[in-house]
């Protein structure tokens, strides 16, 4: 490797993509193309970065399998950063096996982390934990150890385990400080801010207040009967009743929980459950049927008691009933929540992460765009959606920089 390539690699390792570009910007040999792509990716120009890395992979010869595999790993991370979650995981796995075969264990492990992070993004937490369990970060460089802890923190946050997430972020901050990579430190700081940001709202006895993640964890571990509007679950201790596939029953449960210890009129329940502006006899008959179904599914947690004015929820063992709602209760809140990470998402990636159809997601994006809450760029398959960017903030991207010895 010549001196300019070595200097560019060192600049990238130190978190200086502009310094790297100064050395290889005018070169078109495969190592220079790869370094230019990584530098542009770190600067946020993901489209050109992807094209350069792909060119580099094609330009490396048949005897340079390791270099090609590294380019595949870099392209996979660009795909992850641009939320192209449909990028073929089998291609990344093949590159990882090549790197392991040739002894490049650091980049092979990084490829594993990319696969785990993709699983976390699409909500397959059990698979992500199993994959992570087989990785030992101890012998890895500081940057890889920081990424390992960031993944642990991400899983813990999604499982509402604030203490575990905080402990992982403490270790991530220590490792990021040793790595001295500004983008890595920025990602750790961003994760810390999530712990201090309201994660949900508590609705109880007519009052409302925001909750941080650690407060949500404490609430779910308390003796309260929680109607969880974030996951459409009713829970008390370890007992859980999922209503994710029964929206009418959940609407009734939430309405009754919000009014507890009072009751809710039949007309109001008809409006919440069926969206009817005025209740007629057919609506009231259907309400009686749905209330009967709600009694059946929640019999171990609470009863639904008829009152003179309507219906009321009566807990079996819990001393109080509360509702755990999203921080912002608006239409298409789930789509907004994914876009809140500041990254650019395709509608297909959002559909994969949400477990919904792409057409449903597209309608939600169009509605949010009409309200000025999201914006798009690109056309066709390259179209991406994101929240309007805040001035002074850049999207961090972590890519493994080649070392001088490579």
Image (cartoon, rainbow, N blue to C red):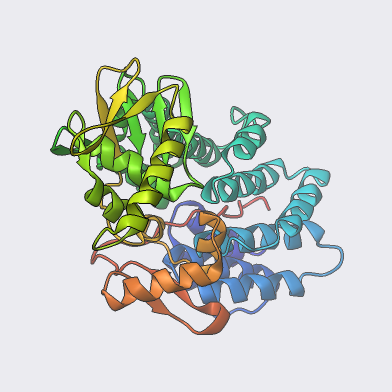
Is the residue 100 above or below the residue 45 in the image? above
Is the residue 159 above or below the residue 391 in the image? above
Quick check: can you spot residue 25?
no
The single residue placed furthest to the right in the displayed view is: 62
From the viewer's perspective, is 303 left or right of 65? left
Residue 209: x and y in percent read 16, 38
From the viewer's perspective, is 314 left or right of 176? left
Q: Quadrant of the N terminus?
A: bottom right
Quarter of the image holding residue 58? bottom right
Quick check: can you spot residue 90?
yes
Residue in the image at 54% along x and 83% along y: 380
Which sits in the foreground, 193 or 243? 243
Residue 16: x and y in percent read 43, 59
Quarter of the image holding residue 144? top right
Residue 369: x and y in percent read 33, 75
Which sits in the foreground, 142 or 387? 387
Is the residue 379 above or below the residue 308 in the image? below
Residue in the image at 51% along x and 47% along y: 245
């Amino acid at each position: 490797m010549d001196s300019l390539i070595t200097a560019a690699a060192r600049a990238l390792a130190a978190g200086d993509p502009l310094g790297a570009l100064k050395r290889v910007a005018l070169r078109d040999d495969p190592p220079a193309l790869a370094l230019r792509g990584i530098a542009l990716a770190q600067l946020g120009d993901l489209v050109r970065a992807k094209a350069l890395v792909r060119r580099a992979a094609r330009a490396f010869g048949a005897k340079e399998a390791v270099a090609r595999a590294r380019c595949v790993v870099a392209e996979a991370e660009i795909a992850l950063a641009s939320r192209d979650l449909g990028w073929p995981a089998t291609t990344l796995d093949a590159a990882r096996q090549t790197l392991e075969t040739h002894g490049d264990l650091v980049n092979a492990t990084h490829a594993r982390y990319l696969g785990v992070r993709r699983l976390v993004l699409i909500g397959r937490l059990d698979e992500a934990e199993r994959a992570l369990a087989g990785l030992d970060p101890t012998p890895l460089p500081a940057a890889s150890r920081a990424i390992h802890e960031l993944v642990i923190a991400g899983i813990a946050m999604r499982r509402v385990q604030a203490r575990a997430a905080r402990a992982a972020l403490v270790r991530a901050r220590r490792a990021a400080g040793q790595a001295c990579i500004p983008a890595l430190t920025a990602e750790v700081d961003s994760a810390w801010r999530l712990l201090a940001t309201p994660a949900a709202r508590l609705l109880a006895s007519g009052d409302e207040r925001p909750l941080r993640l650690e407060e949500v964890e404490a609430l779910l571990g308390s003796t309260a009967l929680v109607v969880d509007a974030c996951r459409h679950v009713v829970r008390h201790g370890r007992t859980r009743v999922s209503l994710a596939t029964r929206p009418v029953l959940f609407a009734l449960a939430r309405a009754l929980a919000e009014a507890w210890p009072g009751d809710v009129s039949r007309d109001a329940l008809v409006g919440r459950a069926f969206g009817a502006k005025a209740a007629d006899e057919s609506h009231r008959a259907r309400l009686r049927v749905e209330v009967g179904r709600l009694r059946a599914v929640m019999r171990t947690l609470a009863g639904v008691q008829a009152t003179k004015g309507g219906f009321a929820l009566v807990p079996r063992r819990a001393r109080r009933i509360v509702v755990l709602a999203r921080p912002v209760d608006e239409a298409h809140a789930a789509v907004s929540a994914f876009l809140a990470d500041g990254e650019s998402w395709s509608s297909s990636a959002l559909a994969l992460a949400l477990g919904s159809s792409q057409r449903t997601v597209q309608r939600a994006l169009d509605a949010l765009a009409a309200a000025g809450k999201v914006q798009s760029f690109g056309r066709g398959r390259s179209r991406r959606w994101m929240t309007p960017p805040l001035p002074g903030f850049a999207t961090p991207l972590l890519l493994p920089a080649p070392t001088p010895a490579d």
